[in-house]
Each structure stands twice: as C-alpha cells, then as structure tokens.
Amino acid sequence: MNQTTTLERPRTGATASLEVTHALTQTLYREARCLDDEDYAGWVAMLADDLHYHMPGIETRYRRDKTDQVTDLTRMAYYNDSLDEIKKRLLRLETGTAWSEDPATRYTHIITNVEVEHTDKADEFRVFSNFYAYRNRNERDEDSLIGSRIDIWRETGGAYQLVRRRIILKHNVMLSKNLNIYL
Amino acid sequence: MRLERIGREPEFSRYMDLKEGWLDRRIFSDAEIYEEELYRIFARSWLFVAHESQLPKAGDFLTTHMGEDAVIVTRQPDGSIKVYLNSCPHRGNKVCFADAGNTRRFVCNYHGWAFNTAGELQGMHEEYCYDEGDIDRKKNGLRQVARVGSYKGLVFATFAQDGPSLDAWLGDFRWYLDMLLDNEEGGTELVGGCIKSVISANWKFGVENFIGDAYHAGWTHDSGCRSMNDGQPFPPIDMENSYHASVNGHGWEFGTEGVGDLFLLGRPKVMEYYEKIRPKMADRLGTMRSQIFGSVASASIFPNVSFLPGISTFRQWQPKGPMQFELKTWVIVNKAMPDDIKDEVTKGVMQTFGPGGTFEMDDGENWENCTTVNRGVVTRHERLHYRCGIGRQIDHDTLPGIVYRGQYNDANQRGFYQRWLDMMEATDLGAMPPRPEPRLTGVAETRDLPGLFAL
C-alpha cells in the first residue's frame, strides 16, 4: 500500500503539463458533480481500491505546540476511511430508512485553486484544491464548509482514480450539525 | 459562591408532572428558563471538565466550558488539577485561546497580565504604573472554581462551595460507571483530539436521548445499523431482561445480552477483544456487570455528559442558549488495549457517532426539529408525553438505583427531569433528597485505580 506516493513527498514536484492539469481539473469537477447529484456509484467508480480518505479533527493550538494533528492517524478524525469503509457509510443511503436524507439535501461543491504536480511515480499526480461545499435542506437549513484538499490521483486506463485525499476543514467547532457530505 | 438569583420563589414544578408522565415544552425553548438553568443547574452541579489522560504532565492544560462559563483546566506540578475562569480579572479578556497544550503561564493579550498555571497573578506589562496599594496580586488571580474532584479518571468541577461531595453526587451510579471506567486493569483514556459540532437544539434533548431512549434507536438508526452490519437489522430488545436505572438524575439503560452495542459498532475485532477479556471483567465487576457491558445500552451523567459503553463515544452537551448546544465528542478506550484495538474502536466510533457517522446524522436532525418547532406560541404550550413504562418499577437484588424493567421506557428520562426540578427549586443543595436512598456504602463496592492523584 505504501508504494503509492505520500501526500508529503516530494515536497514540491514539477508542475504537470497543461494537458494533464486540464484532465485532472475536469476530473475534480466531475467528482464534484457526482457528489452534488448524489451519484455515489459514479463517485465510487472514481476511487482507487487502496484509497485513504482522511479528514483530521484539528484542535486550535498555539504556534509553539508541535503536536502532529494532521498525519497522526491514531487521533480522532471526521473521516479516516478505506474504500470499504466509505462504501459502508454509503450503504446507509440505500437502506431506505435514512430518514434525515428524505427530503434530500441540496448540495453544491465549488472546487477552486487547482494545482497539479508530478510525483516520483509517472502515473501518480499530487493535486491541490480548495472547496466551498454549500448545503441547504428542508425550509431554511443551510451551512457552508470551506477548506483545502491534497490528493494523489493515479492514471489508470486513460482515467484518473483518487488514491489519497486529506481534507482540512477551516473550522474549529464544526459549524454544522453533521457531515452528511463528502468533500 | 452565592448567586443572587437563587432564592427567588421557584415555580418550576408547573412545567411537569412526572407521576402523570408529561413535560411542558417550554423547558426546551424558553429563554428565561434557560437563564435559570445556567444559575441553578450549571453554576451548582458537578460538571465534567476533563479526563485525567488529557493532562498527563505538569503544565498540560485544556479549555472548556462549565455552563457558558469559559474555564481552563491545568495539571499542577504536584499532580493536582486546578480549574479557573478563562477570564482576566483586569478587563475580562480571555487569557487562553487554545483548546489544549502545555504551558508555564497564561498571559493576557490586552495588558500583559501574566498568570502561572495555578492561576496566580505573577506580573504585568509596565508594572510601575501601579502605585503602592493599587493592586493586591493575591486577590487578582484567575477566579478558581470552588471544588475539583475525580472519579476513576473523570475530572469534575463545581462552582458551588456547599452542596454534595462528588461521591454523594454520583452515589450508587458509581456501580454503573465502573463498567465504563474500570472494566479492565489500568482504567481508561481518551483518544487524542476532540471533535466539536453545533446543533440547533436544546441541550436536554441530547442528554435525555442517551439517558434512556433505547426506544428511538431501532427506528431512527435502522439505516445506521444496517450500513455498519451488512444489512442486518437492530438486535432484538428483551423487555424482560433489560432495564432502566436512575440515580440522582444520572441514568443507564441496558440489556444483559452483552453484545448489542459491540455489534452496532460494526468492528468484529473489538467484539473479539471484549469476549477475550470478559472472564476477567467478571472477576473484576461480578457476573451481572460483565453481562451488561457491551449490551445495547446508553447512559448520561447529570447534567450534561453521555456515553455508549461498548460503542465508546464519550460526549458533552454544552449549552449555548435555549435553542443551541455545542457537542464535544471524544473516544474512550481502555489503556490496556493494544494499539490496533484502540484504532479499531476510534475508527468505529467516528463511522457511527462522529459528525459524519451513520448513527449521528439522524439524531441531530430530530433534536433540532423537536426544539425549533416550539417557536410557535401555541405549539410551545402543548405537553409532551413521557409515560412509557410508568408502571414497571421493580426492586432488584443486584441493581442499585431506581430500577424499571424493560429497556423501552421513559423512566430514566423522568429521573433526569426529577433531578432537574430538584435543582431548579432547591435553595440549599444539601437539602435535595437522594434519588433513591443510596444502597452502597462508601467506595467499598467500587475499586480505586492505582496511581490516580487525589485532587
């Protein structure tokens, strides 16, 4: 599993070609559209078998505090999932008894600030992006989740699959009642 | 500490009749009642402020709230723990802005007033501006809470100088708490980090859900259960061999089948682990408690802490106005667990009861709508039904507390609101009746973990 490029190294990679950058940007947009449309089968098809999908819980600490709150996987996290674990979560929506998902939430993912870099492996690319995920449901429930992501995407057979994602939400207290959303 | 508001003619009994089994909805939305709760309950209760494992070294600190009062909790060089207001006595500014860390002092950003970790004023910026007699440093430290105590790793603090000791406050509930805190040698610890979210609901809805509401689980959480367990439905409830137990407003509802909550966690390795240690648990806690642990169960400590023994989410409902609370969640594990089991528990908790958890997502939605619908003036005067199982109280040879048969019951909820009423009306906390009379004597029936500091 650790054959795959890590999110940290190499620290900076050469910028990918316009063509690859365009293809991966379009891939991020397509992924966002799957999530907005609740097309989870379409989303899962974009995820690699060895996926690690991670959104750490980050406390507010002083600058001098060197506690590793991001890469230490033993700490609490909103998501710290393999592909199988993501699929388990998604099963909830197929039961027909996920009461709070009916009526459906209205989602919009806005993906920006896309940068694509080469890694040490020819078929894997590091992709930085920012997100603004807006949710609105029932009469006037609404909230906004804003943050940044670092991904590794792997080219397989002309398409790209998500292998690693780290999501950094820019909240301390998550200003929302739940996370019925993938970012 | 005297709070002027206490002593006003209380009239809270008109908001409920627990013998009949109803509550007035206004206790879930009314701003004046909420203000009274801050004075009468949160400023006088023993409140959970930390787990000792969060503060292993001298200088370790965390910030939290007691009611809506911001406090700092710190480990002292002598091993004791101090709790004081996170507010400078000069102009009131916060002196600590971090959730947690380690420090030698807290310095106010406004005028540089500096306090050691005991909360004592050490000095300030441009100290010469104060003439002799202007300031008594000893009287201008950070305001300490009245009392701090701990029970098997859980640290509690209270602003009330008088009133019950922590032992009396917890009373026979310690018999139940030991199933969470002392089911294995070494006791418990919290996994690193704390995840906080905001729910636009009254704080009591979270507490009462965990204190006794097994009833909602099979319906609200059908989707969560099936997603975690390959489509299997909720484990069946045995109404003959499951119970509600209420002590001084705390409550634990539970089966005796031993595996239900472990099943819901959806982590077979964790289930195997507990099966392996269950014989030792029986030596430690007796057969009855070793059969209760791991069953479909949930519990709350009055007024605002809840947990699921077996699923291992540990949480606090922090009030933020009548129609909002902040939910702080942790994962509680046994210290003796191997690292891979701790990781399994942590992942399992976050997949079920984290903000993105398959169970959690359906709860907040319910509580918000239970609360916000009371904006309607007609709606808010309607009563709510709390009579389930009202005739099923029993005496049980082994189980302490006010015990009801049948896990589907409102008994612990009624016990919680009885204590709420006791505190809302009490002028003298010492005069509050124990509910029920304690059965256990002293701490003989519980165990003391080695190596804990007296606070």
Image (spheres, coloured by chain):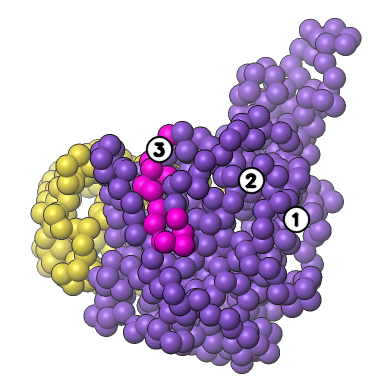
Chain colours: A yellow, B purple
At 79% from the left edge and 76% from the top edge, which residue is drawn?
B444
- Look at mark 2 in the image and give the residue it sits on: B426
Give the magenta range.
B17-31
Q: Label 3 sits on what residue type?
A: Asp
Residue A119 horizontal/vertical position (percent): 31, 55
Q: Secondary structure at mark 2?
A: loop
Q: Which residue is mark 3?
A: B30
Nearest to the observer: residue B310 or residue A150: B310
Q: Which residue is mark 1?
A: B165
Chain holding disc 2: B
- Check chain identity for marks 3 and 1: say if they share one: yes
Residue B48 percent coordinates (x, y): 62, 53
Instruction: Tell me the subunit letter for badge 3.
Output: B
Answer yes or no: do the residues labelled 3 and 1 have beta carbons within 8 Å? no
**Residue A45 in sight in this render:** no
Going 43% across and 79% down the picture, which residue do you hit?
A: B406
**Badge 3: residue crowd in 10 Å (few <14, some 14–19, many ≥20):** some
Give the mark, 2 or 1, whose residue is nearer the N terminus: 1
- Quadrant in which residue A35 is drawn: bottom left
Q: Is residue A72 left or right of residue B231?
A: right
**Distance in Å between CA atoms under marks 3 and 2:** 20 Å
Q: Amino acid at mark 1?
A: Ser
Residue B29 in magenta stretch: yes
- The image shows residue B312 at horizontal and vertical percentages of 50, 69
Crowding near the residue tagged with mark 1, few <14, some 14–19, many ≥20 C-alpha atoms within 10 Å = some
The amino acid type found where label 2 is placed reads Ala
Name the front one of labels 2 and 1: 2
- The tag earlier along the polypeptide, 3 or 2, is 3
Q: Is B333 colored magenta in this rendering?
A: no
Q: Is residue B197 above or below residue A162?
A: above
